[in-house]
Image (spheres, grey):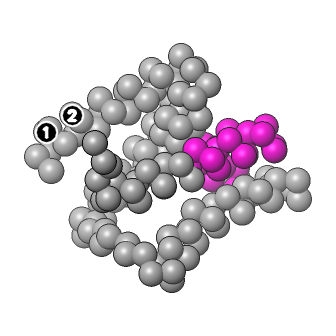
Amino acid sequence: MLMDVHALPSLLGGALIGSAAVILMLTLGRIAGVSGITATLLSGSVDRQQLWRLAFILGLITGPLLYSLLGGAIPAITLTPDLFYLVVGGLLVGFGSSLGSGCASGHGVCGLARLSLRSIIATLLFVLTAMLTVYFTGK
């Protein structure tokens, strides 16, 4: 059975994310958890030895722009215009990342690869919460 050509971008994207996580672990011994990287940047405690954090976040931002410049199609993203829900949602994500000692990228990509029990439980809870949200909101 041949792979669906529409799945190729997702496959390549996943391979790039996994490769970046492995390279970061092999070179700096760090987990590619976006919430932890961002929290450290926002705390202002980054020194010259930690400039990789800034490069990591800039890569997340500029990656799609570069992809677009090279001719890739970026899907439209539609957000609800209600500022209240955006702010509450952002606060809940931040609280959840803090409570769970990490986010989906740290637990779901890096933690599962290391067979971390904490990450397996966290990822199952992330997926279950997403499924229940979709079910109850009907979106």
Q: Quadrant of residue 18?
A: top right
Question: Residue at the location (37% across, 27% down)?
Answer: 125
| Residue identified by numbered label 1 | 136
Residue 36 belongs to magenta span: yes
Residue 108 image position (x, y, % from top left): 49, 35
State the residue at coordinates (65%, 50%).
20
Q: Is residue 123 magenta?
A: no
Based on the displayed image, in which of its 4 quarters is residue 123 positioned?
top left
Number of residue marks:
2
Residue located farthest toward the top when viewing the structure as drawn: 117
> Residue 49, image x and y in percent?
88, 53
Horizontal relation, residue 61 to residue 89: left or right: right
Of the pair 54 and 93, the residue shown nearer to us = 54
Residue 82, located in which quarter of the rendered image? bottom left
One can see residue 76 in this view: yes
- Residue 110 location in percent, x, y? 59, 35
Secondary structure category for the residue under label 2: helix
Q: In this picture, is 68 found above or below 23?
A: below
The disc labelled 1 sits on which kind of residue?
A: Phe
Residue 119 left/right relative to 127: right
Residue positioned 48% across, 55% down in the render? 13
Which segment did they paint magenta?
17-41
The residue to which callout 2 is attached is 132
Q: Is residue 115 above or below residue 95?
A: above
Estimate the spatial distance between the alpha carbons at disc 2 and disc 1, rounded to whole Å: 6 Å
User: Is 5 situated above or below 130?
Assistant: below
